[in-house]
Image: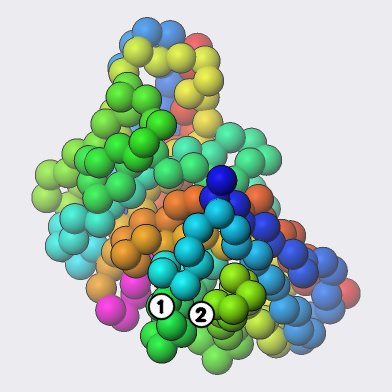
Amino acid sequence: EVQLVESGGGLVQPGGSLRLSCAASGFTFSSYWMSWVRQAPGKGLEWVANIKQDGSEKYYVDSMKGRFTISRDNAKNSLYLQMNSLRAEDTAVYYCARHPGGSWFDPWGQGTLVTVSS
Amino acid sequence: QSALTQPASVSGSPGQSITISCTGTSSDVGSYNVVSWYQQHPGKAPKLMIYEVSKRPSGVSNRFSGSKSGNTASLTISGLQAEDEADYYCCSYAGSSTHWVFGGGTRLTVL
């Protein structure tokens, strides 16, 4: 069974940092693009970033460039999102998703909640 | 404000058909055939329902179908069932600068 499990969310103060992880199983992780998508409380979905199979290409939504870094460790079947200089508006559930061919998102993990507040 | 425009809500009775529109521009929906649709029940992760405009993943009911005309994509659900009540989001590739954009979501209520 294809499974994605996020971890690392929690409460952080404005200006702080957090590193999210996504553990993948049930498929050949190194063969797929992967993405992070977030959803603020009561709001819609927002694509955050994606990364190519070998990590050689990474793309970000403009508002997060320079603050967020996506990475992966194919040996550990894991995807990461390093988030720095966090703001209140970054409060959201962060989902990792497999991104076949860089064309759609399937499946999604259960999400991890990041709350930025003093 | 989301990049793709969806109606905030739609409703229908069991057995009826409904269509959710997703309006973009010539820079996203109009230029690429990589529109996808996601279903999200409250407190759950999104689930892929349609990809590449009209393709249905294995396991998704054939009551769900997708199409596109110009800058507008559509999701049609026929034979509405109570379990279809959820939020639905469209998504499209938007080029090498913006990459991926979602619609604001549509709340489907089954009356």
Q: Identify the residue position indicated by label 1 in the image.
A: A52
Q: Which secondary structure dominates the residues rendered in magenta?
A: helix
Q: Give the residue at x 20% y 67%.
A: B27
In depth, the one of B100 and A42 nearer the eye is: B100
Looking at numbered disc 2 in the image, what kind of residue is underneath it? Answer: Ser
Q: Give the residue at x 37% y 25%.
A: B61
Q: Residues within 10 Å of mark 2 (few under 14, many from 20)?
A: few
The answer to whether B69 appears left or right of A38 in the picture is left
Query: Residue B68: within the magenta?
Result: no
Is B71 rendered above or below residue B15?
below
Please tell me in which quadrant of the rendered image residue B60 appears: top left
In depth, the one of A51 and A42 nearer the eye is: A51
Q: Residue furthest bottom?
A: A66
**Residue A1 got which mark?**
none
Q: Give the residue at x 18% y 61%.
A: B32
The answer to whether A63 appears left or right of B29 in the picture is right
x, y (%) of residue A98?
47, 60
The span from disc 1 to disc 2 (Cα, nearest Å) is 20 Å
Is A65 rendered above or below residue A107?
below
Label 2, secondary structure: give it.
helix
Chain ID at mark 2: A
Label 1, secondary structure: give it.
loop
x, y (%) of residue A9?
77, 66
Q: Residues within 10 Å of mark 1 (few under 14, many from 20)?
A: many
**Residue A63 got which mark?**
2
Q: Nearer the viewer, mark 1 or mark 2?
A: 1
x, y (%) of residue B42?
64, 36
Is B9 rendered above or below residue A110?
above
Please tell me in which quadrant of the rendered image residue A36 appears: bottom right
In depth, the one of A20 and A14 nearer the eye is: A20
Residue bounds of the magenta highlight? B96-100
